[in-house]
């Protein structure tokens, strides 16, 4: 876990309202999840524990990202329940920070949620996907034709459109994200 002070990155970021206002893609999907998400009493108890460990955080994201349309509203609602303030940074405008949080050491996969303490030091990192969501997309990708097939690109776009619609409309998937975040924070 990084002991680097990430406060300057936090200060550079947008609030949730500013991020929403800046969105040109996936705003409807993100808003749907945000408005319909519900927590259990057990969830709320853990979010209160989180409030004692982290006071703020940084989100590396982009509005074009389907995973962000799912994860940003879930983690924003968690932050609100825990009195944690997120600041949003666009991945491609903040590669110096992004490159500190590569998935599998190579991929600039987003969104990435960096939980910080009062001094701006990292307490936890979550993202870009819950394991169940990763399994789902991995399985779906096996249905695609070969990458050199003439219809590969079209089929891939269809797959990702359908995947985004599913993950932003199915509360059981939202619950998988919540449980994944809980597991990470209990860590």
Image (tube, rainbow, N blue to C red):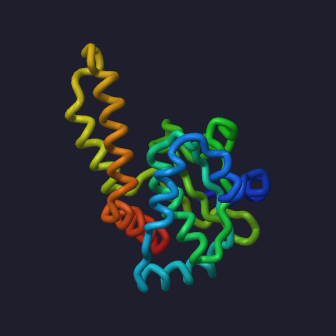
* Picture coordinates of residue 83, whole percent (x, y): 64, 76
Among the 4 quarters of the image, the one containing residue 184: bottom left
Residue drawn 27% across and 13% down?
150
| Residue at 50%, 42% in the rendered image | 65
- Vertical side of 163 occupied by 118: above or below: below
> From the image, which quarter does the N terminus lie in?
bottom right
Disc tally is 0
Q: Position of residue 16 (x, y in %)?
A: 65, 59
Image: 177 above or below 160: below
Q: Residue at x 77, y 59 (%)?
A: 7
Is 55 in front, or is 62?
62
Q: Residue at x 50, y 54 (%)?
A: 30
Quadrant of the image containing the C terminus: bottom left
Side of 54 where 166 appears, left or right: left
Comparing 12 with 27, the one in front is: 27
Q: Position of residue 118 (x, y in %)?
A: 74, 71
Q: Position of residue 64 (x, y in %)?
A: 52, 39
């Amino acid at each position: 876990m990084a002991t680097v002070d990430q406060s300057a990155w936090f200060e550079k970021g947008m609030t949730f309202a500013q991020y929403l206002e800046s969105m040109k893609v996936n705003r409807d999907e993100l808003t749907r999840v945000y408005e319909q998400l519900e927590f259990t009493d057990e969830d709320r108890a853990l979010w209160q524990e989180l409030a004692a460990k982290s006071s703020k955080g940084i989100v590396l994201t982009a509005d074009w990202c389907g995973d962000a349309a799912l994860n940003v509203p879930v983690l924003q609602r968690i932050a609100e329940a825990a009195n944690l303030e997120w600041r949003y940074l666009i991945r491609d405008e903040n590669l110096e920070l992004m490159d500190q949080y590569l998935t599998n050491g190579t991929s600039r996969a987003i969104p990435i949620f960096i939980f910080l303490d009062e001094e701006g030091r990292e307490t936890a990192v979550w993202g870009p996907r819950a394991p169940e969501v990763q399994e789902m997309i991995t399985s779906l990708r096996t249905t695609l034709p070969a990458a050199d097939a003439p219809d590969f690109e079209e089929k891939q776009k269809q797959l990702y459109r359908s995947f985004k619609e599913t993950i932003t409309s199915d509360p059981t998937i939202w619950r998988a994200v919540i449980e994944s975040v809980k597991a990470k924070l209990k860590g």
